[in-house]
Image (cartoon, rainbow, N blue to C red):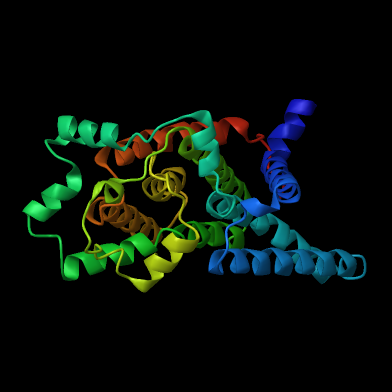
Amino acid sequence: MMLDFLRRRLDELVTGLFLILVTVLTVLHPPVFTTGGGLLLARWLLSSAAILVAVLLVASRFSSRARNALRFVIEWGIILVAVVGYVSLRLLHASAITTWLGIPSFDHWMMDADVVLFGKTLYLWFDQWGLDHGVFLRIMSAFYALYPIVPPIFLAWFWFRHEIAQFYLVRRALIISYCLGYICYLVIPVAGPLSLLHSSTPTFLESTLVYSFLANNFRYSYDCFPSLHTANPWLIVWLSRGKLPGWLMAGGIIAACGITLSTIALQVHYGVDDLAAIAWVFLIAWMARATLPRQQPS
C-alpha cells in the first residue's frame, strides 16, 4: 500500500519536500538570498501563486469550475515548482554547499576529456569552420532560447488531448530529471567553457540582453554536467515516440537537435556534457516508467 501511494504521489511529495526545504532555509538563514531583479521576480511569483491557490481553495467549496481550475493549477504547478528549483540554486547561493563539501571545479577535466574524445573542445571546431559569428550564432541563440518552451508545449498537447497517462509520464520524467540534475550540479561543479575563457570581449551569447539578465539573476554557476538543456528535450522526444502526430514529432526532433547544437556552438557546454545528457535520457526514462503506477488517474 505504501509503495503504491509513493508511486501515485511521488511528484507531489517531491514538490512538497522541496518547498519545505526552501521555507526552512529562508526562515533559518534569510541573508542567503541574493538581491536584485531575480529576488524581486521570485517573490512576486511566489506571492501571486500563494494568493491564487488560496482563492481557488476557498472557491472550490462552492463551484465545480473552481475545483477544476484548482486541479489544473496543482497539476501544472508541480512542474513549475521543479523549474523554480533551478532558480533557487542561484537565489539561495547553493554553490556554498559545493564549497562546504570541498569539491573543486571539474572544468579542466571536462576540457581534457573533450580533447581526448574530439581532438579539441567542440566549440573550437565551429570556430575552425567559420561558424563563430553572424547568422549562424543568431540561429543557435534562437534554438537555445527554445529550451524552456519545449516542455510546456508537449505537456499541453497531452493535457488538452486528454492523454493523461502520457502527461503524467512526461511530467514525472522531467521532475526526476530536474531534481537529480540539480544534485549533480552541487556535487559535480562544472561551469562550462565560458568560465575558462580569459577574454575581455563578451561572446555573442553573453552580449545579448536576455542572456545577461538571466545569467546575472538566475543562472547557477555550475549547471553544466549533465546538460539538461540537451537531455530534457530529447527525454520528451524519446518518451513521446508513437504518441504524437508526425508534424509535432518532427518539430520536437528539430528543436532537440538545434538546442543540442546550440549548447556547443554558444560555448555553454563541453562535448562530454552532452554525451552525459544522452545517457541521462535513457536513465531518467527508465526511472520515470519504473516509478509510475500501472493505472493512472483519469
Residue 195 picture location, percent across and down = 30, 48
Residue under the point 68% across and 55% down:
75
Q: Residue 68: which quarter of the image? A: bottom right
In-front residue for pair 191/66: 191
> Quadrant of the image for the N terminus?
top right
Residue found 83% across the figure and 70% down from its top:
55
Q: For this rendering, which residue is in front, 245 or 102?
A: 102
Which residue shows up at 11% across the image and 35% down it?
119
Camera-side residue: 254 or 203? 203
Of the pair 291 and 137, the residue shown nearer to us: 137
In the picture provided, is 72 more to the left or to the right than 112? right
Residue 82 position, x and y percent, is 59, 50
Image location (x, y in percent) of residue 22: 69, 48
> Can residue 22 be spotted in the picture?
yes
Residue 86 placement, left or right of 60: left
Note whether residue 173 is visible. Answer: no
User: What is the residue that sits farthest to the right in this orientation?
Assistant: 62
Count every numbered label the image shows and give the total: 0
Task: Say above or below: 64 vs 119.
Answer: below
Establish if 15 lies above or below 127: above
Q: Position of residue 259 (x, y in %)?
A: 32, 55
